[in-house]
Amino acid sequence: MPTDFSMPAGLPIQFHGMISTIGLLDIVDILVVAIILYKVYEMLENTRAITLVKGIIVLLAVTMVASFLELHVISWLLQKVVTLLFVALPIVFQPELRRALEHLGQGRFLAPSVSLDDEEARQVVRELVRAVKMLAAKKIGALLVIERDMGLNDVSATGIQLDALITADFLMNVFIPNTPLHDGAAIVRGKRLISAGCLLPLTENRKLSTELGTRHRAAIGLSEQCDALIVVVSEETGTISVAENGHIMRHLDGETLQAMLTPAFVKPHEGLKDMIRNWRRRK
């Protein structure tokens, strides 16, 4: 006797009925939630918090499986763990929550913090590279933090506010030894130096080489907590290093440094405004 693999008769009707109840506002609601979730993931992607998020998702999945299989003791234990976990979430994610609220308050949650056109961005990169090469040649210690998507207002507040246009000569003056701005980090936002003499958190990684001094450990420490790109010039050797995502790359030359800094300033894709501006220039 042949087996009938056809779908139940009532299923298409139920599916059609469910689709027919979705209106325009429901679609807008879903899109808004999707955008918010994507922005939250984008904000957490380059931080240590993403590992905790993955752990929470796995824990919730195991809880659902245990409940489905009616494993009562395991389900009870997992439910208690999840309850305690949600109480601890505001403490665990305190830095990320603070940054998210800061982005909302500044209107930067759905948009990049700084917008530079292609020429401005490449000019900033050239000035930064020239300054770093001069500092390295003279063995003047320096710590430059390039802000990207995550705001660094809390770090900037620990130093002296400047808001000055970036030039190589100006950066040289900032890091001249025995001056008030020499110690600490300088924060770069777009084409401006917003502050100098800032304090950075030191990394707690004990596996780092003993050759790395306080500047390098501070650069790694900040890169573990945000998506900033931190350039370090060693005072002892003049070595150029870059810290990103908790890792540090050392003994860089000018060309390598420029290649690493360019993506932080130059947009990979043109927006509508940039396309119109470039089209007008070509005409």
Image (cartoon, rainbow, N blue to C red):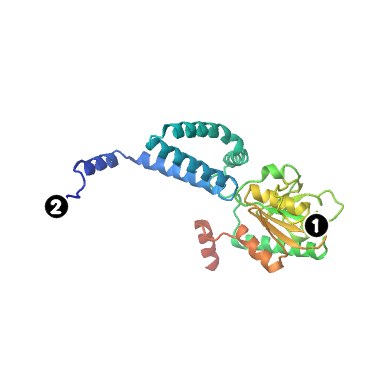
Question: What residue is rendered at 42% in x and 32% in y?
Answer: 72
Whole-percent x, y for residue 204 in the image:
70, 47
Q: Earlier in the sequence, mark 2 or mark 1?
A: 2
Q: Residues within 10 Å of mark 2 (few under 14, many from 20)?
A: few
Q: Along the line of sight, which residue is nearer the eye, 167 or 201?
A: 201
Which residue matches tag 1? 141
Whole-percent x, y for residue 209 in the image:
74, 57
User: Mark 2 or mark 1, which is nearer to you?
Assistant: 2
Q: Along the line of sight, which residue is nearer the eye, 85 or 235?
A: 85
Left or right for 148, reference 8: right
Q: Along the line of sight, which residue is nearer the eye, 149 or 105?
A: 149
Which residue matches tag 2? 2
Left or right for 23, reference 234: left
Q: Along the line of sight, which residue is nearer the eye, 271 or 219?
A: 219
Whole-percent x, y for residue 29 in the image:
41, 40
Element under label 1?
Answer: loop
In terms of image quadrants, where is residue 61? top left
Whole-percent x, y for residue 30 in the image:
40, 42
Question: What residue is rendered at 20% in x and 44% in y?
Answer: 8
Which mark, residue 125?
none
Question: What residue is rendered at 57% in x and 42% in y?
Answer: 107
Give the total of numbered labels. Answer: 2
Question: What residue is rendered at 42% in x and 44% in y?
Answer: 31
Element under label 2?
Answer: loop
Amino acid under label 1?
Gly
* Separation of residues labelled 2 and 1 (CA atoms): 82 Å
Is 206 situated above or below 94?
A: below
Amino acid under label 2?
Pro
